[in-house]
């Protein structure tokens, strides 16, 4: 992630938002909100329920926020926020969301998809059908 930010800023990007690949219900409004917040903040973070984050946005490269982080643990968000505060960066938090890391999260996703089925999204319908094939226990 650090290298992605470094590369994009070196190529002239002014604001960058990186989103995790394990948050299928993330809508574009959240990403647009993150970019909007970067207009007057140096950092924006979308916290996930498991203690990590699903989105990180920066207005300039600050590699130290990626140092001394216990990646893959429930400490990632708090450690990152600690680094942001130590560096004196202005920041904003988005609403907390869940990402998909295990079977329990797949069950939560399957239940959440029920309300999206009526929206007519072919991608989410496809995902819901695949989850149905897994016979996940949602009771």
Image (cartoon, helix red, strand yellow):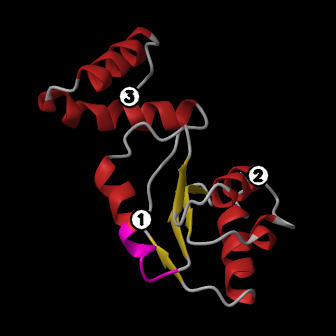
Which residue appears at 62% of the width and 60% of the height?
A: 51
Please name the residue that numbered disc 1 is placed on: 34
How busy is the neighbourhood of tag 1: few (under 14 within 10 Å), some, or many (20 plus)?
many
Image depth: mark 1 or mark 3 in front? 1
- For this rendering, which residue is in front, 110 or 78? 78
In the image, residue 108 above or below residue 75: above
Examine the image and state in which quarter residue 87 appears.
bottom right
Q: Tags 3 and 2 in contact by the CB under 8 Å rule? A: no
Q: Earlier in the sequence, mark 2 or mark 1?
A: 2
Percent of width and height locating residue 112? 31, 38
Please name the residue that numbered disc 2 is placed on: 3
In the image, residue 45 above or below residue 135: below
Mark 1 to mark 3: distance in Å?
Answer: 32 Å
Can residue 65 be seen in this snapshot? yes
Mark 2 to mark 1: distance in Å?
Answer: 20 Å
Residue found at the far top of this picture: 133
In the image, residue 106 above or below residue 39: above
Examine the image and state in which quarter residue 113 appears.
top left
| Residues shaded magenta | 36-41
Q: Tags 1 and 3 in contact by the CB under 8 Å rule? A: no
How busy is the neighbourhood of tag 2: few (under 14 within 10 Å), some, or many (20 plus)?
few
Please name the residue that numbered disc 3 is placed on: 138
Percent of width and height locating residue 42? 56, 79
């Amino acid at each position: 992630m650090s290298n992605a930010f470094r590369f994009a800023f070196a190529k002239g990007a002014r604001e960058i938002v990186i989103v995790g690949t394990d948050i299928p219900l993330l809508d574009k409004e959240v990403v647009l909100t993150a970019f909007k917040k970067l207009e007057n903040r140096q950092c924006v973070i979308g916290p996930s329920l498991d203690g990590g984050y699903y989105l990180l946005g920066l207005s300039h490269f600050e590699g130290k926020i990626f140092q001394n982080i216990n990646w893959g643990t429930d400490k990632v968000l708090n450690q990152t926020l600690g680094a942001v505060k130590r560096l004196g960066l202005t920041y904003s938090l988005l609403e907390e969301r869940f990402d998909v890391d295990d079977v329990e999260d797949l069950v939560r996703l399957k239940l959440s998809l029920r309300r999206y089925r009526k929206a007519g999204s072919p991608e989410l319908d496809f995902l819901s059908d695949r989850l149905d094939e897994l016979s996940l226990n949602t009771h």
